[in-house]
Image (cartoon, grey):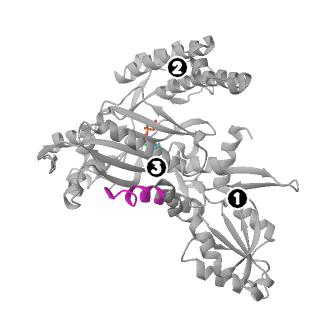
Amino acid sequence: MAQDDVFKKVVAHCKEYGFVFPSSDIYDGLGAVYDYGQMGVELKNNIKNYWWQSMVLLHDNIVGIDSAIFMHPTIWKASGHVDAFNDPLIDNRDSKKRYRADVLIEEQIAKYEDKIEKEVTKAAKRFGDSFNRELFCETNPKVLAEKQKRDALNERYATAMNAMDLNELRQIIVDEEIVCPISGTRNWTEVRQFNLMFSTEMGSTSDGAMKVYLRPETAQGIFVNYLNVQKTGRMRVPFGIAQIGKAFRNEIVARQFIFRMREFEQMEMQFFVRPGSELEWFNKWKETRLAWHKALGFGDESYRFHDHEKLAHYANAATDIEFRMPFGFKEVEGIHSRTDFDLSQHEKFSGKNIKYFDPDTNESYTPYVIETSIGVDRMFLSVMCASYCEEKLENGETRVVLRLPAALAPVKLAVLPLVKKDGLPEKAREIMNELKFNFNCYYEEKDSIGKRYRRMDAIGTPYCVTVDHQSLEDGMVTLRERDTMEQRRVAISELCSIIQDKVTITSLLKKLS
Ligand code: ATP
């Protein structure tokens, strides 16, 4: 299936089966805001639990918090968001469409990378087993030419972004002959800055309301609480604080469904370390986080690191974990070595001493911070895209199956009486009542058993049991597995032990330790 089609189908599937709806649907939606439906919320909660437990249960030096969305406005001054949380935007005069100048340029860089990759793939096919990728990349003239263009552009882009030189960004777009994907023209406006924070007012206007922001990231809630947590939790560096919560950004270009939203959710963990040890921890966290993704079983080739050429002013190392979405490799998670920037800024702006006293060395210092930051919604999208599958069956029919990792599936077990009579629904209910305390079960008696199986395949339910007349006599049911469609008779009394181990978050966590 063409990758474009996969994406369209995933979007339609999300709506049809109650995963994601456009927000305010009956009012024709609200730009880049989405609601999660009855299936979506379960999948989302499972993703969050997997993350939370991998942080807080598996590390005895990581604890969680839940800080408020509203924060003192000076926090955003200190963090740099008021002055510098801007995206450079550019309009195409013909299509009237607005773009992020940096994204247009990054897409151009990706095009050079794609060209290199195509040459390599072609050559690998030609040379077979004797192919030496490294040697080929170092010597092939076509690859070298593309690399040179890519590196020159990368360097020019990094310099322009570091200086926020808006004229230069526009000039790059002109020189690279980047066209608007809608109009196909190069009729670009100037590049302008646009602050991404939403603001509102707290208190009534008569007593001088205060301008407050909807947080654009959850991280600052961790920084301003780090000493509270360290002292009350008697934490010793190195230690981490994890948080899951909503963040808001007035994104300029908000297409691509839940990939880029204006209201979204983040799972962030800030890890506080001794100055000088941060790069070692940065590398450890890169590996730990990649392993978390890979444990889901979507294939190691679905992930890659993208190390940042252009570092934010506060960072001394940064990488993204990118996932192969239907529209290319895209960032799902960022891992940043943020130095002591945030804590030092809060010390300066609050006037409070927030240094850490290290009992091992008897000195006070401002810890350095490694951040891992992942978007729940982007993770959700990557899971949906990787799981969506249309399969041709032996009888010529096609089935749509969501091959979700069982631990993330919204429903773990469907309990289906073969017919709606003869005491079968009652027996099925009995099974439900027993198992519902262990995992999410779903009861359905409408339509043929085949149709019910298909509906369960479409929402990714890993197991179905069918209760038939024989079950009333021998206490056995038919257990069907989603992926193989294999069916076998098992005792009702064994269902829990057969299924439980495979569908809990613990099954994923065990792969990590
Ligand atoms: P991008 O370059 O795509 O705008 P970013 O580098 O600004 O992302 P971070 O500030 O590092 O993103 O945020 C960490 C994570 O939060 C991202 O990896 C992504 O998963 C998620 N995220 C950021 N912005 C959005 C958004 N508008 N909608 C959904 N998820 C988002």
The relative height of residue 77 versus residue 98 in the rendered view (above or below) is: below
Mark 1 burial class by Cα count in 10 Å: few <14, some 14-19, many 20+? many
- Name the residue furthest right: 395
Task: Give amino acid for label 3.
Answer: Phe
Task: Out of 276 and 451, give the one closest to the viewer.
Answer: 276
Q: Earlier in the sequence, mark 2 or mark 1?
A: 2
Indicate the quadrant containing the N terminus: top left, top right, bottom left or bottom right.
Answer: top right
Which segment is the magenta one?
Answer: 49-67
Q: Earlier in the sequence, mark 2 or mark 3?
A: 2
Residue 510 image offset from top left, x and y in percent? 49, 59
Secondary structure at numbered mark 1: helix
Horizontal side, residue 172 vs residue 15: left or right: left
Horizontal side, residue 487 vs residue 509: left or right: right
Mark toward the viewer: 3 or 1: 1
Q: Which mark is residue 188?
A: 2
Task: Give amino acid for label 1.
Answer: Ala
Q: Is residue 61 magenta?
A: yes
Mark 2 Cβ inside 8 Å of ligand 1: no
The relative height of residue 425 versus residue 208 in the rendered view (above or below) is: below
Please give the residue where the numbered disc 1 appears in the rendered image: 458
Q: Give the Cα separation between the discs numbered 3 and 1.
A: 25 Å
Q: Which mark is residue 264?
A: 3
- Name the residue furthest front: 130
Residue at the (62%, 23%) spot, across then down: 132
Q: Is residue 429 magenta?
A: no
Mark toward the viewer: 2 or 3: 3
Q: Earlier in the sequence, mark 3 or mark 1?
A: 3
Residue at the (23%, 53%) spot, across then down: 236
Residue at the (39%, 42%) spot, across then down: 284
Task: Out of 116 and 161, give the one closest to the viewer.
Answer: 116
